[in-house]
Amino acid sequence: MPNNAKRARTKIPMVEVIAPNGQKSLWVAAVARANAVAAVKQVIPPNYVAALSERRLMITRKSEVLWRGEVRRVKL
């Protein structure tokens, strides 16, 4: 394996979700940036608001696996 492959990094889009009570949470979606909000909206209650965040989750090959298409809540 080439040395640069070991250091490969991927930036995953993050979505900020706001519950009706104002509580915020961050989610990641292993999809194209343009589809991130729609992917998160499929797994949150319909009365929650989702918006694309300027933040991106940086992962490396050594990071926890996030499968293509997977949506997951993250804690920073």
Image (tube, rainbow, N blue to C red):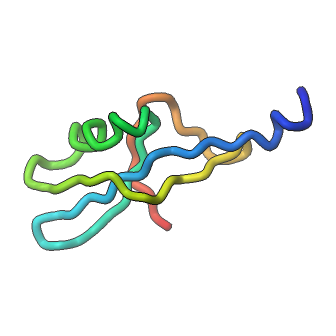
Q: Which residue is drawn at 82% across and 38% down?
A: 6
Q: Which residue is drawn at 33% across and 52% down?
A: 52
Q: Which residue is drawn at 44% across and 57% down?
A: 74
Q: Position of residue 68 (x, y in %)?
A: 49, 28
Q: For this rendering, which residue is in front, 7 or 43?
A: 7
Q: For this rendering, which residue is in front, 56 or 24?
A: 56
Q: Position of residue 32 (x, y in %)?
A: 43, 33
Q: Position of residue 54 (x, y in %)?
A: 42, 58
* Number of marks in picture: 0
Q: Residue at x 21, y 47 (%)?
A: 44
Q: Quadrant of residue 60?
A: top right
Using residue 48 as the reference point, say whether residue 33 is left or right of it: right
The residue most toward the bottom is: 22
Using residue 20 as the reference point, say whether residue 43 is left or right of it: right
Q: For this rendering, which residue is in front, 45 or 4?
A: 4
**Quadrant of the snapshot with the N terminus:** top right
Q: For this rendering, which residue is in front, 46 or 3?
A: 3
- Above-or-below relation of 36 to 55: above
